[in-house]
Amino acid sequence: MNTKRKKQPAQRPIITRRRFLQACACTVAAGALGATGYVAVNAPLPAPQPESAALLAQAAGRPQPDAPILLVTNQRAMPSFGAYLGAILRAEGFVAFRTARIDDLDGALIGRFPLVILAAGELTSPEVEMFRSYVLSGGGLIAIRPDPRLADLTGVRHTGGVLAHAYLSVADHPLARGIDRHAFQIHTPMEQYQLAGAEPIAWASQPDGSATRYPAVMVNRAGKGIAALWAFDLPHNIALIRQGNPGAANQERDGLDGIRTVDLFVDWIDPDVIDVPQADEQQRLLANMIHALTDAMPLPRIWHLPQGATAVLVATGDAHGIQVGHITPGLEIVERYGGTISVYYTTPRVSTARRTARRIQWWAETLPVVGHVFEEQSGYPTPRLVESWREQGHGFGLHPWVEEGVAYGYNRAWNDFVKHGYGPAAPTVRTHRVLWSGWVDTAKVQAQYGIHMSLDYYHAGPAMRRPDGSYVNGYLTGSGLPLPFVDEQGRLLRVYQQHTHIVDEHQIAAFDHGYEMNLSAADAVALSRQQIDQAVERFPSALGLQSHFDPYAFSPEKAALERDWLDGILSHAASRGVAIMSAEQWLAFTEMRHGAVMRDLAWNDAEGVLTFEAETGGTAQHHLLLLLPVEHRQRTLRQVMIDGMLASAIHKRVGGVTYGAVPLARGQRRVRAYYVKS
């Protein structure tokens, strides 16, 4: 028998007459405040940003030639995706480039850049001769679906024909090393060329990978220089792979009620290639080419993920007006593995009067002495609790219902969110039911509310099922990395598209929709483990995760299913060294990486020394990883100094290139890399 005296539960102090009067006074004051300010407080507020806030400003004027690469955009293309090509370069870690419009160029300026990347579009006769002279005198040129008059410079003959709905398969060429051997989809027209001295890097092919007689990517030595050609508009094609079919915008195509992001991919994404990030692989082929053609100096890059991680799990979960007790189980599982998660919360549907009363009550419970009298009893998250979650690294943001229209739905959700005291709204979001308007219209509305990353693209519904009844899973958008949205005219938006790859309602019967794979928790975990392993070993990715909090409110059986599924995935991710991050943390890193700058690059060929200044800002918790080629012109990287301090480098292979990788802290850093003859 246990003879120890049981500890009595702590008792609340009995409220005294004085405290009772204080509480009454507070209540009266709050009531007076509500009476005088009720109408003003509850009046609908407009979006905090104008519609113009959605668009990113484009580079203009003549750039400084303090970097080895010049990206030339061409507004004569209809549409012009040159700016999106710049976003692709940054996604691949190339920040040592400058951008100029074709109208701002002359031969003297381009001659100061070792490599020029020319976006698609027609050229004038003087411009054709300018690029011809540049290459013949020793420059490097990568031309994206260029003016046909540059064909002979790139070692091909233009037949005048065009291929539609082609595929691309890489050739057995050094520049294609490390690129997956699947046949990749090409949604843009591909010019028909015949080889006339060029080396084929990739061919137009059939879906099974069998090559046609038409080269798709090729390279050619001309005079003292070298010129490469892409037979199709690469950045436009990547946008179409990632964002779906613009011709399907606002159409119900998958048989599932509601126009969703997945409707853009019906009869668009080839299910036989969905398990490969085909958009990423195409841009990595471009990255291999850039590395090879920038022969004037070793070309630095920035690794895709934080601090050298091989994969990241971007953890998120939707919550539909549920209580704290149904959110904390998911938070606890994530915290068990040292991670954080973003909660996308739909506020409870209550009247404005009830919302105001609740807000006053939440304010009153923070008062000294008498606060406990007003303690929350409804079970819904309080602003104080939400703030504590954010301090732990979790996110708490909008989950708007937009059935009555995107603009109206986002405004109503944002107003209700901030007037509940949950503001400011998180800069990432997922829309309820992933409903979507236009090709990128929803993203433009999101930008008006300070949202800079959308996780609205994910696997769901009948579109993920083959005719034989089997389901597909993988890279719906062809990508494991974020890029800014781009509109139909090729204008960049201030919102990143982050795919959600691993989805509970796609794999398990979390909601009993009838269109899930209906796997057991163990089988669904095994499927997700495969995708995590693939990212770690082959395709560097930030894998979006959707784990709804609602099943914890449904039944013990649904709660157990969701818990086992989430725990199994996170356990495996942690065992593979995969960081588990909230969407807000991932966005902070993404913005820091995409905003990085390298300037004043200089290569001393006699001494084998590369010097440059790197600058990064932002508030991300994780450092960048700087990549420097291990080999350059029969020289080998010996050591790296950052701000005069020796940095320890590890080897990391990216595509077909081996790099020395060193951490790069925030701020302004001076880098010196020393190469010795092999």
Image: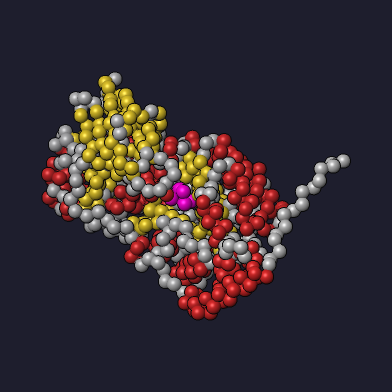
Viewer-nearest residue: 78 or 647: 647
Side of 416 relative to 610 (left or right) = right
Side of 666 relative to 566 (left or right) = left
Q: Residue at x 56, y 66 (%)?
A: 363
Q: Position of residue 403 (x, y in %)?
A: 52, 69
Q: Position of residue 83 (x, y in %)?
A: 29, 53
Q: Residue at x 59, y 74 (%)?
A: 25
Viewer-nearest residue: 45 or 207: 45
Q: Is residue 372 visible?
A: yes
Q: Position of residue 225 (x, y in %)?
A: 19, 35
Quadrant occupied by the N terminus: top right
- Is 585 in the magenta? yes
Start and end of the magenta stretch? 583-587
Q: Quadrant of residue 630?
A: top left
Q: Residue at x 23, y 44 (%)?
A: 70
Q: Residue at x 52, y 62 (%)?
A: 422
Quadrant occupied by the C terminus: top left
Please determine whether, in this image, residue 146 is positioned above or below residue 625: below
Of all residues, the one furthest to the right in this rendering is 1
Viewer-nearest residue: 120 or 165: 120
